[in-house]
Amino acid sequence: MSGHAEAYAPVFVGKRKEEITELLKRYPTKMAGLLPALWMVQEDRGWVSEQAMTEVAEVLELTAAYVKGVVSFYTMYHQHPVGKHFIQVCTTSPCLCNGADKVVNAFLEHTGCKELGITSADGKYTVIEVECLGACGFSTPVQINADTIENVTPDKVPVILAGLK
Amino acid sequence: MGYPHKSHPRETPVLSKHFGDGESRSLDGWKKRGGYKALELALGMTPAQIVDIVKASGLRGRGGAGFPTGVKWSFMKPGDGKPHYLLCNADESEPGTFKDREIMRWTPHALVEGCAIGAYAIGAETAFIYIRGEFQEPIDRMEAALKEAYAANILGKNAMGTGKTINVYVHKGAGAYICGEETALMESLEGKRGNPRIKPPFPAVSGAFGQPTTINNVETLVAVPHILVNGAEWYKAMCLSNAKSTGTKLFSVCGNISKPGNYEIVLGFPFKDFLYDLCGGPTAGRRFKAIIPGGASVPIQTMDEAEATLMDYEGFVAQGTMLGSGGVIVFDDAQSIPRQVARLTRFFAHESCGQCTQCREGTSWTTRILDRIVAGQGTYEDLDTLLEMAENMTGKTICVLSDSCAAPVVSGLQKFRHEFEALITGKRSSTVAGGSQTTAASAKLSVGAGA
């Protein structure tokens, strides 16, 4: 990420501009559009860069520092690029007592990531532990990008990875 | 129906009747199952009439606090000239709880209808359903249902042809347990960090965007249409114990148990029958050891306490805990209580917003001390320190996240002290059959990482 040398292509042009304009009608303040705007950035770019934060700030009449403060509060906004398949394994108590730690290890091994939070050399995978996914009756739930997979056990991990496009 | 299992004959499926039934997701399918009759009925009444019926039904908040819903609604004064807001709390993040997820996945129109009725009853033209960011499927199901409801003029500027404006929108969270706290949710909706607010002012005076606001849990709102169609007396009659706890309640069951999943029972149902009959008891060869019956924030119960419990708001309190969100976490005899308590406090340390010192420091240090004990490096003094810190973390902060972290520590030490002491005197690690240590890498990532 060399940053300054690359030209930044804005997100909020064309359809996205229309979309955010339309969305803002729901709220009495522009600031309320911040979480949705950040989601749009992440959908389009895969992560939320500093330049994107500056752009969002301009669109919503906020400061870039304010936007960064909000981005950094929430765990789901990526402040750096992540693997094409972002794998979150729930390890909170109800899943831990059913062996979630073994599921984590299976993902680390089969993706080649080896360490939590580190993207695999081929750029395909990032594995993290996540706090409660709200699917405790289906332990262990694993979220890969926007999809939640229920009842994951270590032996299912290779099949799940093979099925990712 | 039922999901993931068929309904048990001793369940009373009202809200969960269509779980597992894919056809109930569409507007047509929902109408065939009696959908939107309650909204039609409601729009023919005055807001005050609806509030009275909900009051008379005895319905209490299903998100955790159990506050009477009709009373909460009566704090709102339609016609005061201010914009009112209804917020639906769908930030379901309390470990052990996964009922709202299934309501939204299988019966999204039930929630649209509940929100529309709630909004009208409190004089609001706008309702926001705040759904946690991880719930992509529930979000998609809700968006699809809302699109159908707008296209059919059920919502919008002329809702059901009555000339009344009712808008319902989904607002997607972005990963923060604390946003399930009502004032943190409001902050988050407004585009801010999810820091809980000091109360008063209470939401009915100054809530979302500084305006009068009511916030209700998903399960509370989906109960309302049934109450309007069948009457307050019908709802009130669903009661197996005492008149303060009426209606049906969804319990999410997880952990070490034969049949995890959501179960809907009439309040006051015996917890022992629930665990052994409905949920199939422990898995083969194991015995139950301890239960957290209301989501991670409530005290741990011993099996003696659990088996003597009647499942209602008062019944859980009488047996040393709380009904909370109805997220039942079961630990069997293969689990180490100190290790599970340490994992729970790690959760709270990760989710603390960091505003209050007692919480920011307390959750993190509690976790470090517990990890040390679990690793066989603890001392007796540590146990006293944990209890002393727990006292400082209870009732002294803006919200109750800190109290929630202290609950498993205090109850764990009261009821399972011998397990902590065994780790100290034996100086051995807490690996029990079926369990293993949390990885060092995960420990590094989680402790004190903020929200």
Image (tube, coloured by chain):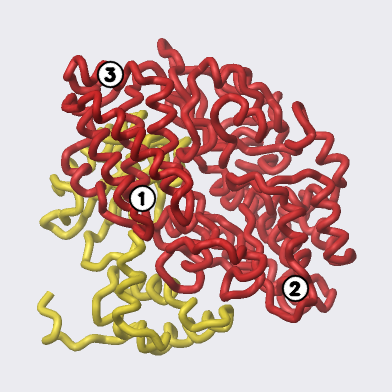
Tell me the crowding category of disc 3: few under 14, some 14 to 19, or many 20 or more residues within 10 angstroms, Cα based.
some
Task: Identify which amino acid the numbered label 1 is placed on.
Answer: Gln
Residue position for label 1 = B358
In the rendering, at what x and y percent does residue B288 appear?
46, 17
Subunit under mark 3: B
Residue at point 35% right, 36% down? B388
What residue sits 72% from the left and 48% below the top?
B68
Q: Quadrant of the C terminus of chain A?
A: bottom left
For the residues labelled 1 and 2, say whether their Cβ atoms are less than 8 Å apart.
no
The answer to whether residue B149 of the structure is visible from this angle is: yes
**Quarter of the N terminus of chain A within the rendering:** bottom left
Element at label 1: helix
Colour given to chain A in the rendered image = yellow
**Are dots 2 and 3 in contact, CB under 8 Å?**
no
* Gap in angstroms between the C-alphas marked 1 and 3: 26 Å
Which amino acid type is marked by label 3? Glu
Q: Say which colour chain B has.
A: red
Give the residue number, with chain letter if any, for mark 2.
Answer: B153
Q: CA distance from mark 1 to mark 2?
A: 50 Å
Q: Nearer the viewer, mark 1 or mark 2?
A: 1
Mark 2 falls on what kind of element? loop
Could you tell me residue B167's position as x and y percent?
Answer: 67, 73
Question: Which residue, given by chain and number where applicable, does mark 3 sit on?
Answer: B421
- The chain holding disc 1 is B
Element at label 3: helix
